[in-house]
Image: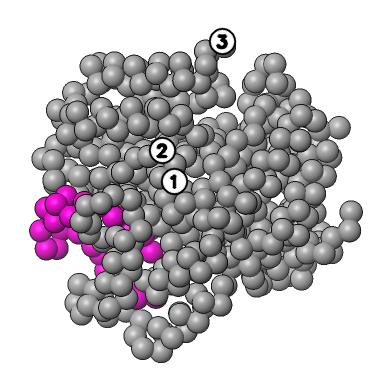
Amino acid sequence: MKKNFARVNTPLPGPKASLLLERRKNIVPKGISNGIPTFISSAKGAILTDVDGNTFIDFAGAIGCINVGHCHPKVTNALHEQIQQYVHPGFNVMMYEPYILLAEKLAEIAPGPYEKQVMFANSGAEAVENAVKIARKYTGRQGIVVFQRGFHGRTLLAMTMTSKVHPYKFGFGPFAPEIYKAPYPYPYRRPQGMSVEEYSQHVIQEFKTFLLGDVAPETIAAVVMEPVQGEGGFIIPPSSFVQGISEICKKHNILFIADEIQTGFSRTGKYFAMEHFGIIPDLITVSKSLGAGMPISGVIGRKEIMERSNPGELGGTFAGNPLGCRAALAVLDIIEKENLNQRGMEIGKILMERLQRLMNQYDIIGEVRGLGAMCAIEFVTSKKEKEPNPAIVKSIIGEAYGRGLVTLNAGLHGNILRFLMPLAITDQQLTEGLDILEEAIEAVAT
């Protein structure tokens, strides 16, 4: 096929990358994983260039951090302007306006008619941990309910809340107490003969039983839910399930926390994925694409909940760094001016139409699913057996990057191919990337 964007002219790794890789092996622990054996030289929009001059179409977006694209000029200009003024006075020492501006903007766009407050941290895991602290402080309860296959981070508490044992939890215990895992629907793997709605009601009933057999609702501070499970495999719950859990929370005065770290900021075609389900969370955690690559995260919540914590109980040394705040303000301006919510829906439509054709063609594709541009393919041994097929996903990823496409897997078994391309990707780049993907699948499936 003729390629206009992806060009791999050397073996991977190339000669310059090979030298860097040897240095990496000596100085960086193997516990830090890498998806592709090369080193970046530059990036723009949805195109990555490595140190050997190879170019790649980016379908990974730094695991969902680059919705507005790599090095968007509005972001880089904002960073250049800010770095000339001040870099880090420390908000808890001397405050600065970008923190206030960003908090005001997030409170404005977050769902819910009530007054809101916003605090900032550095990473998604920190946002989750602070949301838990806030919920516990407000309710006076300790229990936190998360869901099977959920991912919330790698710090001690967030790791405890995460489901996948390898590689995130094995050997790292003991874990934090008062964390409980509840059932979460997986529509593709529902019992045979059961409709999606019947299945949804079945899992809601399992949740009610969970509150009888595992933890009393009177002791639960919050339920934490990803609107679409990210690392868990891009699993989209039925709306009735999300709404049912929300109603149970209201009945028992349990806070509902939406973990929007991977789903937020136009990835699903809306600012926040919970908007698809008609749910107004009590607290929302945000990070990843909020900063376009700058480390910033936050918790958005109802004012009466957020205000319960006393001075010094929240925050951190670098929390809400001015550079992160300025980058995030630029991101929100880009989303609005370039209509990235609509673009997320357009990309999702193109993806799902193409992936559906692939599913009809290959028996190893069990399901394709998506919400906006948060789409995935589930690979199985066969449509009939539905056995997870991680080996073929690993092979496809290798074939893809050898042809100039960067992709990611997901799921407990690693058998999901997920798509997190920058929403700044052009139609031509998207089409070429999908052509490469199709070549990669054909190479391993035949």
Residue type at the position of mark 2: Phe
| Label 1 sits on residue | 273
- Residue 63: % across, % down: 54, 53
Q: Circle 3 is placed at which residue position? A: 193
Q: Work out which residue is located at the far bottom of the displayed protein and give it.
A: 84
Separation of marks 1 and 3 at Cα, in angstroms: 29 Å
Instruction: Find numbered disc 2 in the image and state the secondary structure of the residue it sits on.
Output: helix
Q: Is residue 63 magenta?
A: no
Residue 211 visible from this viewpoint: yes
Label 1 close to label 2 by CB (< 8 Å): yes
Mark 2 nearby-residue class (10 Å; few <14, some 14–19, many ≥20):
some
The residue where tag 2 is placed is: 277
- Mark 2 / mark 3, whichever is N-terminal: 3
> What is the magenta range?
295-323
**Closer to the N terminus: mark 1 or mark 3?**
3
In this view of the protein, can residue 167 be seen by the observer? no
Q: Say which of 65 and 164 sits in front.
A: 65
Picture residue at 32% right of the left edge, 76% below the top: 98
Task: Give the percent coordinates (x, y) of residue 351.
Answer: 67, 45
Placement of 122 over or under 73, stated as above or below? above
Q: Residue at x 75, y 49 (%)?
A: 434
Q: Residues within 10 Å of mark 1 (few under 14, many from 20)?
A: many
Q: Looking at the figure, which quarter contains the N terminus?
A: bottom right
Looking at the picture, the colour scheme in use is one colour
Residue 282 drawn above or below residue 254: below
